[in-house]
Amino acid sequence: MHGGLTARIVEAAAIEAGAVVVDIGCGAGDTTYAAAAAGAGRVVGVDVSAPLLAEAERRRTGREAGEVTFIRADAQTYGFAAGSFDAAISRFGLMFFSDPRIAFANIATALRPGGRLVFSSWQSPQRNEYFTLPLSVLAARVPLPNQKADGPGGFSLADPDRIRDLLSGAGFDQITITSVEDTPWIARDVDDAVSYLRSTTLARSVLPTLDDEANHALDNELRMALAPKQTADGLRLGTATWLVEARYSAP
């Protein structure tokens, strides 16, 4: 789903041979292994989820360049050694900090002077068909929770001005924020997409309030809404993200 974005993050990070990289919110390790394959000497993946880190370990093949390790930790408070990384990357892993100012400052001090930070975050939900299409169907049947724009949550870094403020406050400069619009592969077909959407955290939190009849009707409504998005190689939905690049300017 996010392979193209992963490639852009790794390219923007300009990972040099032997570089030491930290992957914040590494999840199941896609970006971690991509950084290793780009020539990094060592990559450390950090995530709070034990199940995702177990999946990342399972995916280890031994074919990746460099040394890959995973740490279960919260990057907001983890005691990184100062100046220990040449680059920090993240694909949708920086939007969930309880205190982003502390978190970005902690990540900054883990970088050497001039070290790169490259990450992606979602733009507003209104610019993402990936969210608006299924949510419009869901909202017709159940009340959806409100999410504050300043987080923590998936859209806490949707405002580029807020991104600049947080990064400059943490000691970053040379900040560039690029809009990336795409129609990535989401699922094999409509039924696969419905199954995937039902597995999301939001769906699992609200769908138990529906009875069997309402759940069945919801599935049919989702299928009808998603059907026009089917292509020859799978179902695709529009997305809009920010690709953020910055350098740490040590005090």
Image: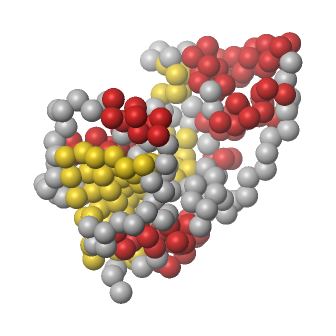
**In the figure, 184 relative to 74: above or below?**
above
**Residue positioned 48% across, 28% down in the render:** 185
Quarter placement of the N terminus: top left
**Residue positioned 31% across, 73% down in the render:** 82
Let me know if residue 166 appears in the view.
Answer: yes
Colour mode of the rendering: secondary structure
**Residue positioned 62% across, 27% down in the render:** 199
Quarter placement of the C terminus: bottom left
User: Is 83 positioned to the left or the right of 17 in the image?
Assistant: right
**Residue positioned 48% across, 65% down in the render:** 77
* Residue 135 picture location, percent across and down: 73, 35
Residue 59, quarter of picture = top left
* Residue 133 picture location, percent across and down: 69, 33
Quick one: which residue is furthest to the bottom in this view?
A: 251
Residue 64, quarter of picture = top left
Let me know if residue 123 appears in the view.
Answer: no
User: Is 44 positioned to the left or the right of 158 in the image?
Assistant: left
**Residue situated in front as seen by the camera: 99 or 78:** 78
How many discs mark residues in the rendered view? 0
**In the figure, 165 relative to 151: above or below?**
below
